[in-house]
Every structure is written in C-alpha cells, then in structure tokens.
Image (spheres, rainbow, N blue to C red):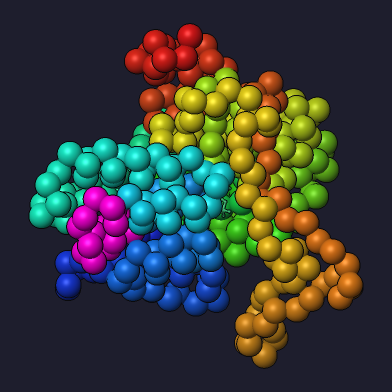
Amino acid sequence: MRIDGVAYRSVWVNAEDGWSVHILDQTKLPWAVEIVRLTDVAQAAHAIRAMQARGAPLIGALAAYGMCLALRADVSTDAMERDAKLLAATRPTAVNLGWALERMLTRLRNTLPAERVPVAYAEAAAIADEDVAQNQAIGRHGLPLIEAAAARKGGKRVNVLTHCNAGWLATVDWGTALAPIYTAHNAGLDLHVWVDETRPRNQGAALTAWELGKHGVPHTVVADNAGGHLMQHGDVDLAIVGADRVTRAGDVANKIGTYLKALAAHDNRVPFWAAVPSSTIDWTVSDGVAEIPIEERSAAEVTDVTGRTAAGRIETVRVSPLDSAAANPAFDVTPARLMTGLITDRGRCDASIAGLLELYPERRQGVV
Ligand code: MRU
C-alpha cells in the first residue's frame, strides 16, 4: 500500500545491505512515519513484544526474518532452536508466530548449517510474499459481501464496521479485514468504515484510521462502546474483523472487544465476518474459549493514554486514579455460533469444522 504515493510493505529487507530488516515503527503512528532497522534477533523480539510491529500475520513474517538475523550471528542448531524459542515467547495469542517459526525450523533443520542463512532469507521472503497473495485473495473473496450489501441498498453507501487494525500494517501488505474494503473501494464502490477506537492501545483510532485515510477510504472513528448503538439504528451493514487464531471449530480469537461487537451484531442481525488467512487457523485447537492462550499485557496500557498535545508534543497521561489497579486481557474469543462466516484466502465458509473442511479437505484426516 502507499504512504503519500510511495509503496510500502510493513516489513522488508534493506535493499542496500541485503540483510538487515526494516519495519515501520507502529508505536509512532499516526504522528510520525519512522522506519526502524533491525540487525539482530534480540531487536526483532523486542519489536514484536513492544508492538513496534504487530498484527498476527506481520509478527509471523517478522519472526521469520528474526530467524534470519539470528542465523547471521550463529548458524548452529543449538542457537537456532534457542532463538526460535526466544521469538516464540514474545506474544502468545496469534498462532501465526508459532506457525512461521515452525515452518522456518522445518526448512532449516534439513539444511546444512553453512547453507542456512540464504535458505532462511528465501523462506522468510516466501512467507512474506505468500501473506501478500493470501490477503489479496481475501480481498477478492470478501468483495461480493460488500457488493451484495450495496445491491440491497440500491447502490447507497455501504457502512462497514471494523475493530482493531487488521489492515496492511497488521500484515505484510493489504491487510485481512481491510483487504475486502480496499478491494471494494478500488472497484469504485461507495463505502464508509466505522473504526472502533480499540482501547487500550487504540489500534483503530491510531492505525486503521491512518491507513484508511492514506488510501482515501471514507471512515469515522467511534468509541468502542458505540457499535451496538450504530447497529440498532441500521447504520452498520456488515462487520469485518481480523483474527489472531481461529480454531478448527470456527471460534475466533481477536483483539479484546471483538466478542462484544459480535454479540451486538447477533442481536441486530448484522452480518459479522472474520477475515482469516490460512496461517491463522489452528487445526490443533477446537474450543477457543478454553484452549486459546490470552495475552495479558501491562496495566499501564489501560491506566495511561498517549497522544499529541495541541502544542504538537507526544505525551502520555494517566486517566485513572493513581491507586486503582487495572487488568489488560489483550484478546477475546468469539464463539463460532456468533460468526456469520469466515473469509479465507480459499473462499468464504461457515465458521464450523464442516465449513472449514470444505475449503481445506486435506485437513480432513487429522481432525475428523
Ligand atoms: O495486539 P495486536 O495489535 O497485535 O492485535 C491485532 C489484532 O487483534 C488483529 O485484529 C489481528 O491480529 C488480525 S491482523 C490482520
């Protein structure tokens, strides 16, 4: 996608030195576009943990490049296994992280140590390129949902609600939930996006609003609690969210607050879809509420808010009493029964084991 006319991915290898890894520092957006150069595995792990790079598919791709940086320092099998564990421990909920690391290790364990570095870069590039292709496919498979909503409204503007940031910043390019939106916008459909602010870290207000704005997509930021009201008044035609992990039964783990939006959508008969690349499906897990590990982040993300003052300074202020405790579960699980369906890179399906197996018949043996 483009920032002021220049095409970017959210992670890339420095074209000049051919090995260091660049990311956009998402903790600085929307106030500044800052590129961070990562040169070792500790920096890559820090970037994921501190959410300089975030979003399930992106942390998978960055972890893959983190392995490249790790191998540049030490190609031995012991170091490789240790550094993969270091990267895997950065964030627990998004399955893409473990998926990408396992794919890298499978390739690298079968490679002689002396040959590992170029093989690792090639595999990481393949993961990144496949992510872009999968997200474009999600865009194509999601487009008919927006077209159908437009047809139902006689061509009047379609309102789509989204939560958190599942746009190009959260992936290598295009995004998952935003891919159908970009595809529809590029095709000339009249649409508008309700952007949940997504407390506590404000990925919606800071990141989704920024990237939609850069692409010229009409949007409005709303407080997290506004969605139910908007749905009751017919102001949401459909909701599309991303996912950090989808179970084989179709339960969807995503940013905290997604479940409440799904409940409101269900009550108001608003279609509620999750956009899911294949790498986000965890075939080993069935019951999302019981089995998906939910990241608990720092209480400071809840008690404090960072933003730009009228004078242009970036400042962090405390919004709750100094002696109040805060809890910060970062994700929740929406049970499959509340999902209208899943938009995958292979097509759309019911959020159920039968629906998923129709698109992934090769998984039939392992799960039934
Ligand atoms: O904590 P974050 O910002 O990494 O959470 C991101 C989300 O919850 C996204 O919706 C999800 O990763 C899908 S990204 C395409």
Q: Is residue 154 left or right of residue 18?
A: right
Q: Nearer the viewer, residue 334 or 196?
A: 334
Q: Nearer the viewer, residue 182 or 43?
A: 43
- Percent x, y for residue 303? 78, 68
- Percent x, y for residue 228? 80, 41
In the displayed structure, would residue 210 be above or below residue 189? below
At x 74%, y 64%, the residue is 299
Q: Is residue 17 left or right of residue 320?
A: left
Which residue is at the far front?
78
Instruction: Please say whether residue 277 is one of the residues in the magenta stretch.
Output: no
| Quadrant position of residue 42 | bottom left
- Percent x, y for residue 9? 34, 58
In the displayed structure, would residue 179 be above or below residue 300? above
Instruction: Please say whether residue 66 is one of the residues in the magenta stretch.
Output: yes
| Quadrant position of residue 109 | top left
Quarter of the picture containing the N terminus is bottom left
Secondary structure that dominates the magenta span: helix
Residue range in magenta is 65-80
Q: Is residue 306 left or right of residue 127?
A: right
Q: Nearer the viewer, residue 207 or 16?
A: 16
**Residue 340 appears in the picture as rendered:** yes
At x 68%, y 74%, the residue is 306
In the displayed structure, would residue 207 be above or below residue 171? below
| Quadrant position of residue 292 | top right
Q: Nearer the viewer, residue 155 or 51?
A: 51
Q: Is residue 42 left or right of residue 200?
A: left
